[in-house]
Image (cartoon, rainbow, N blue to C red):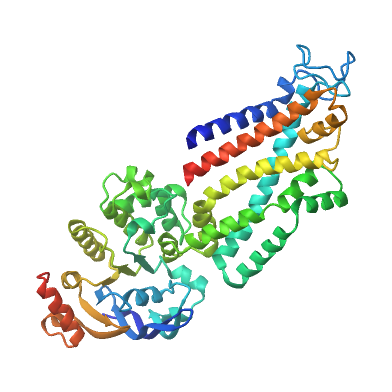
Amino acid sequence: MGSKRLLFGCLIIGIFSLLAIAAPLVSPYDPSSIDQAGLLMPPSARHLLGTDGLGRDLLSRIIYGARISLSIGLIAVGISVAIGLVFGAVSGFYGGLIDSLIMRFVDIMLCFPTFYLILAVTAILGPSIFNIMIIIGLTSWMGTARLIRAEILSLKEREFIQAERAIGASSSRIILRHLIPNAIGPVMVNATLGIAGAILVESGLSFLGLGVQPPTPSWGNILIESKSTLGVAWWITVFPGAAILTTILGFNFIAEGLKKKIG
Amino acid sequence: MGNLLEIRNLKVNFNLDDQVITAVDGVDLDVREGEVLVLAGESGSGKTVTALSITRLLPRTAEIVSGSVMLRGKDLARLSEDSLAAIRGKEIAYIFQEPSSFLNPVYTIGNQLLEAITLHHGKDKEEALKEARELLALVKIREPERVLLDYPHQLSGGMNQRVFLAMALACRPKLLIADEPTTSLDVTVEAQILQLLMELKMRLGFSLLFITHNLSIARRIADRVSVMYKGEVVEEALTEDIFKAPKHSHTRELIRAYEKIGRL
């Protein structure tokens, strides 16, 4: 069951990733070119998913939007895993005062309602794709840190770590080469879910106008543009929504599959 | 023969939540150049704690309260953690009881051997790989090429112990500390490993501190035997003397117990 889910998830994410990478080749139109023939055209042979309120091809915008949304997800999670790994590993390995300090800091970070924190920071720094990646990364590393810490707490008592010390390996070598590779499994599961979370946050931010700025398409800001025309043009809401839903499902499938596979 | 290692008045406490337990209480121990010293004693007598104290590999709750550990005139008990790490594996190496759990499950044998080889001297990959093969041949592993690519879980306990021995000998240590290295193995494999250890000792000339509760092993391999009881060394003598004329009552008891089950 686990491997079927994993395969299915990989298939979904693989397709979206391929579309995103090959966007200029596969998208039928330029995402910001306007079709003079009409705006709010329903799906047809000419525009497979219809056009939006400015007459732009929705399919092309969703394909280009995948680039933005997926890369925000990946890079934000990359940042958060990197921070979480460092804090979690140091905390778990050294213990004592350092551990208490880092874990209390984690508690404090967890106390903030993350979304409002992100809103506040974007309001100050200004919305840009780059800022969004960093902010999401900086506010989502705590789970990873706790996970890594817990893993390392139990791993460091294992015999092969003692054996490493007995052949003269330094602490940093033990952490980097022996503890983290053994602890990485659950982190990968968590990170996969994190990518889904980051894409959702980006969509939410873009929906509020604090995310990716038009005319650059992201799944979130395509959705926001659909808001005013929801009554007359269902396709502008449904298709980007479906893209978000499918991607997140895909990442969740991967995470679940991985969890079953690596326990 | 001179002394390679001199332990004087070693005392180790375990600081638990509500009590302090003295595991090693004033141990003196000498290991001479090139000899096999067996440290014998029942479970909980402090053998392992003594051995781990030599290079301070103790668990966090343990504390060396007093004593000195002189390795050729250097007091290991006063060295910093970094200088001690330079001695571990290079001058003093260990092998342990459960070889399979002392190898990292996520790396191949080759990978771990290479680490042990390059940890103390920088060597290029070619050279290190050549040495890894030689080490596996040294511990009499057939098909070293295949074993280099295997993971620990693919090998038997005896094979893993050979691999671990190869890792321990990678830097040609002067002292090998073997903490019940054959206890988890069956009797035939045990005999093979013991024989291998003795052969390698002759060939490479290291001193061996062998920890066991098994007196028949002690009799087979030891030059001298130290008997520990409740954290103290109660008797230390040449192997033949200790079995012929044990002085301490606990030693006599141990020997009698072994004679009773006919294993001595």
Tell me which residue sits at (72%, 53%) in the image: A139
Picture coordinates of residue A105, whole percent (x, y): 69, 64
Q: Nearer the viewer, residue A184 or B78?
A: A184
Picture coordinates of residue A77, whole percent (x, y): 67, 46
Picture coordinates of residue A214, whole percent (x, y): 86, 34
To which quarter of the image does residue B90 belong?
bottom left
Please, which residue is most extreme toward the front here? A231
Tell me which residue sits at (51%, 57%) in the image: A179
Query: Is the residue A38 above or below the residue B57 in the image?
Result: above
Query: Is the residue B56 above or below the residue A201 in the image?
Result: below
Q: Nearer the viewer, residue B92 or B248?
A: B248
Picture coordinates of residue B4, whole percent (x, y): 33, 77
Tell me which residue sits at (64%, 50%) in the image: A81
Going by the image, does A236 lie left or right of B56? right
To which quarter of the image does residue A21 belong?
top right
Tell me which residue sits at (53%, 54%) in the image: A180
Going by the image, does A118 lie left or right of B240? right
Query: Is the residue A177 above or below the residue B221 in the image?
Result: above
Q: Nearer the viewer, residue A188 or B34?
A: A188
Going by the image, does A234 lie left or right of B259? right
Q: Nearer the viewer, residue A227 or B71?
A: A227
